[in-house]
Image: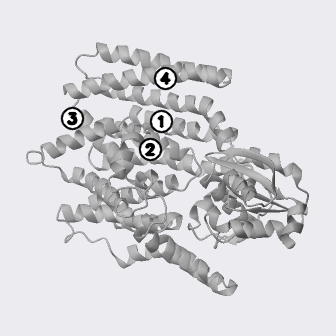
Amino acid sequence: MRTKVLLALLALFFFLLNFLPSFERDLWEPDEPRFVLVAKEMVQSGNYVMPHRNKKPYPDKPPFYFWTIVMSSKLTGGFKTPAGILPNALAGALSILLVFLIALKLGYSEDIALASSIIFASCIKVWWQSSHAQIDMLLSFLVYLSVYLALLYLQDKNKQALILSFFVMGLATLTKGPVGLIIPLGGVITYLVWTKKWKETRIFYPSSIIAYLFPVLLWLVLLVIQAFSGGNTAYLENILFKQTVVRFAKSWHHFQPVYYYAKVLLYDFFPWSVFLYYFLWQVWKNRKKVKLTDNQKFLFSWFLFTVVFFSIPNGKRGLYILPMYPAISIIVADYLFKFKEKKAIKIASYVLASILFFVFLALSLYGMGKFKPTVLSNITVSLPVIITFFLFLFLRKEKDFKNYFKQTVIISFSFFLLASTVAGYLFPYLNKRNSMRFFVKEYEKFLDKNSKVAIAQFRSAHVLYGNRNLIEFPYQDEEDNIDLFVEYLRKTPNSYGIVKKLWCERLKRMGIPIKILAERKVGSKHLCFVKIEKKGVENGGN
């Protein structure tokens, strides 16, 4: 009972930690404003089947995450930051519970199951994705749920659980495409092949296939009808082919080497990646002596299939492998309890405690001088320093290491305090750096209701925070649109433009009299709000 209460408190604390700061920051470039804008335009247009952005079809993602933003906007008071983050904060908190249930179903003790949830909740990537308005935390939660339901079928032969698992895979597909099916199903099939149970375990029934196809085909049928009736057949080709098959076979951005995820896990799964790589090395070194159980094979199948699958395409991002984080969390918890007497584990714990202490201390001293925190954040930042200091002393005195579980809780709680420290100190700084709202408000004073604003490289935040549609051009890169951009500003009365400062300097060298009215660095981009002077229009016409 105490374990379940602690688990519930952990999930609640995790939710509040990720959701509450959303009321004090804007949506950050590039993904967050885009996704919230798409959801906002769903409501404005009444079209919930074909997503739009800037009143143009948006074929990059299916609609499920946008539907959740629409629903959360009713609870949070409109299409602002909390509306985009609420689905992910809730998905992250529920995922903590699912990790616990998956570990229990695999036969692990409640202590190991709870430690698995703590490890999962306290790693950097899970916290970050649960506190940002991106798709992958919601997708991952649906993958975790479908894996848990599939596990119920494999363990208990509960066919209804299998049917429900496939239905959830359908919802995951509506969230981010075929990976919602491929990852959970691929992990399960890998496990069945590895354990040689694939002949005696049937997972494809007419009922399970129908359960998957029902939500997917329902949306696709409505989409096809709307696309052909509105002449948007290019949208169908884009979302059904380019964003799936082509993107996997021939990525057009985020190029990374094949070993990318081995590097990413070091910092995305921190602080537990230290233990993960140590245990993976132990398993490999003793592969002839150590015989993995079926439950361990299930976890390794889930883990390895996901990493191998996403390592194949050239385009890679660290958040792509988030759907397998429960597997590595349980693997780490299992081995920590098995090898807690090993000297290397004790040393690693001492080192981790020391690092945490000095990181917290450095953050506290730097934050108090650099930023202007509130009284609450001052109290918050002092707690992790005190706790990690006593943790370090506690570990030094602990000789038999029997209270490792208690130490795990304290270390993880310290990490949560670090996260709240970052929210209290760093988020206000990052908000000014990454939010487009400040720039929009700066250049809006030059506009009237009849003004036209063109943008050389489209960014949704200008529309979301400016409440006006922008003139955008057909190509993704600014350099490909620059001629069309200049031509539009020359020919259109009362028109303004948004372009990078680099191009302003180039255009001036080309003799185009472009005038910078406002400028600001947003993220890594130095943007300018410009106008071509009247003299330039006359010269351009000669």
Query: Do residues under tags 1 and 3 come within 8 Å of each other at their CB atoms?
Result: no
Front in this rendered view, residue 373 or 106:
373
Q: Quadrant of residue 341?
A: top left
Residue 481: x percent and y percent?
67, 67
Q: Amino acid at mark 1?
A: Leu
Q: CA distance from mark 3 to mark 2?
A: 22 Å
Residue closest to the eye, 193 or 271: 271
Q: Nearer the viewer, residue 393 or 442?
A: 442
Q: CA distance from mark 4 to mark 2?
A: 25 Å
Residue to which mark 1 is pinned: 10
**Disc 2 residue type?**
Ile
Q: Is residue 57 left or right of residue 519?
A: left
Q: Which residue is mark 3?
A: 338
Please tell me whether mark 1 or mark 3 is closer to you in this view: 3
Task: Check disc 2 and report the residue beneath it.
Answer: 96
Could you tell which of marks 1 and 2 lies nearer the N-terminus? 1
| Residue 393 in view | yes
Crowdedness near tag 3: few (<14), some (14–19) or many (≥20) residues, C-alpha within 10 Å: few
Q: Is residue 285 left or right of residue 5?
A: left
SS for callout 3: helix
Q: Residues within 10 Å of mark 4 (few under 14, many from 20)?
A: many
What distance separates the C-alpha of mark 1 from that of mark 3?
24 Å
